[in-house]
Amino acid sequence: MTSDMQRRRFVRGIGAVALAGALAGCSGGGDGAATGGGDGGDSASVPGEIDSYLNDNDANQYGGNAADMTGQDSVDISVGAGNQGYAFDPAAVVVSAGTEVNWVWTGNGGQHNIVADDGTFESERMSSAGSSFSHTFEDAGNYGYKCVPHQALGMYGAVVVE
Ligand SMILES: [Cu+2]
């Protein structure tokens, strides 16, 4: 039952994006439904559980909102962002179920990895620019993760799957 509801919401999200795209062409103004076409798009609110998780761990680059990346087949998150390379950018994202998230290393900040708190995904430690790690989120839920080498420096992030 839960998954039926989620599937319906997912389908509706796709429809809204397709419709918005058809209507808006490449104008992109307005405050309509999920546009999410490019980087740095709309922001979305963050579930309390994830907001606490990121605040409690002093997550770098987290300002209380998530990037709304719903309705996309795949999204990119930078690994090694910020002045010192100890951040994920965006630190928090909201995606639709079925989305592939690609973490892409900037080459800054030394060795990083991606480790989900609940063990759902875990990458190798890598440092070279262009290295990447992907995970497809099939199930709705809140997924907090961190870079183990830099967890004491606030290198935390989260993926919220709708
Ligand atoms: Cu790191």
Image: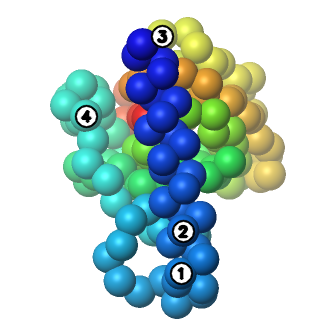
Assign the N terminus to one quadrant of the image.
Answer: top left
> Tag on residue 118?
3
Q: Quadrant of residue 131?
A: top right
Mark 1 or 4, nearer chain start: 1
Report the residue at 25% width, 34% height from top: 47
Report the residue at 27% width, 41% height from top: 46
| Residue 20 pos. (x, y %) | 51, 72
SS category of the residue bearing label 1:
helix
Amino acid beneath label 1: Leu
| Residue 12 pos. (x, y %) | 48, 47
Q: Single out the residue that lies furthest toward the bottom.
A: 27
Instruction: State the residue position of label 1.
Output: 23
> Tag on residue 47?
4
Residue 150 shows in this picture = no
> Tag on residue 19?
2
| Residue 146 pos. (x, y %) | 48, 27
Q: Say if mark 1 contacts mark 4, CB within 8 Å.
A: no
Q: For the residue carrying disc 4, how many other residues have a C-alpha within 10 Å: few (<14), some (14-19), or many (20+)?
A: some
Mark 3–mark 1 Cα distance, whole angstroms, equals: 40 Å
Mark 3 or 2, nearer chain start: 2
